[in-house]
Image (tube, rainbow, N blue to C red):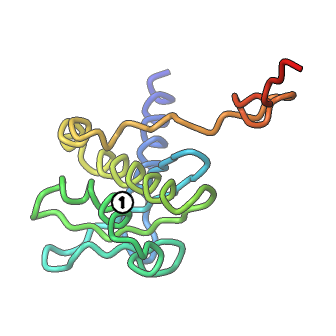
């Protein structure tokens, strides 16, 4: 019986930490509205800067607006000066803003997989909280989700 428990624990570790040609990475998923970001965090040497790639394109090319770049990079600044990561993200669905927020959540979750001690500082800044707001569906007989047609007395 104890043998099965140890095998299950080892399988969980494999899901969190994987290796590729680029080396060992930490994986997490971030979501916002209908956007889904699958994030891989690779350890980089201390002299390198945080290198981000989104859908095979450069980070600055994919997010031309600096506000969105800053939003997606925000959890990386919480890691401290000594820790540097290379980030590879695959994003689908949603708009550009929702994609940036999905990457932010995915990066924060992957950093917690890397080091669980970072959880407290990331949670305090709100990076580990998923924003649950989504678009409400349109109801029959209404113009939008809640807007009704104009009422006329006569």
Disc 1 designates what residue?
72
Q: Is residue 24 above or below residue 21?
A: above
Return the residue found at the far left: 81
Q: Position of residue 112 (x, y in %)?
A: 30, 45
Return the residue found at the far top: 153
Q: Looking at the picture, tell me which residue is in the foreground, 141 or 26.
A: 141
Q: Residue at x 51, y 47 (%)?
A: 31
Please state the total of marks drawn on the protein image.
1
Q: Residue at x 21, y 36 (%)?
A: 124
Q: Quadrant of residue 40 in the image?
A: bottom left
Q: Residue at x 12, y 57 (%)?
A: 80
Say which quadrant the C terminus sits in.
Answer: top right
- Is residue 131 left or right of 33 when viewed as pictured? left
Q: Quadrant of residue 92 in the image?
A: bottom right
Q: Position of residue 42 (x, y in %)?
A: 34, 67
Q: Looking at the picture, tell me which residue is in the foreground, 139 or 66.
A: 139
The local crowd at label 1, few if under 14, some if 14 to 19, many if 20 or more residues have their Cα within 10 Å, is many
Return the residue found at the far front: 154
- Is residue 8 left or right of 153 when viewed as pictured? left
Q: Is residue 109 above or below residue 143?
A: below
Q: Residue at x 26, y 36 (%)?
A: 123
Q: Position of residue 136 (x, y in %)?
A: 66, 34
Q: Position of residue 148 (x, y in %)?
A: 76, 28
Q: Is residue 27 above or below residue 84?
A: above
Say which element carries label 1. helix
């Amino acid at each position: 019986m104890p043998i099965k428990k140890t095998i299950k624990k080892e399988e969980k570790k494999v899901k969190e930490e994987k290796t590729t040609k680029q080396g060992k990475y930490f994986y997490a998923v971030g979501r916002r509205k209908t956007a889904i970001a699958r994030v891989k965090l690779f350890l980089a040497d201390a002299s390198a800067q945080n290198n981000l790639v989104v859908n095979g394109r450069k980070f600055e090319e994919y997010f031309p607006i600096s506000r969105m770049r800053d939003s997606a990079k925000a959890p990386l600044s919480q890691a401290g000066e000594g820790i540097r990561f290379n980030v590879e993200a695959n994003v689908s669905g949603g708009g550009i803003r929702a994609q940036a927020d999905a990457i932010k959540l995915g990066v924060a979750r992957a950093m917690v997989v890397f080091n669980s001690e970072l959880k407290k500082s990331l949670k305090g800044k709100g990076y580990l909280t998923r924003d649950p707001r989504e678009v409400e569906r349109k109801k029959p007989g209404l113009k939008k989700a809640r807007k009704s047609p104009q009422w006329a007395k006569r």
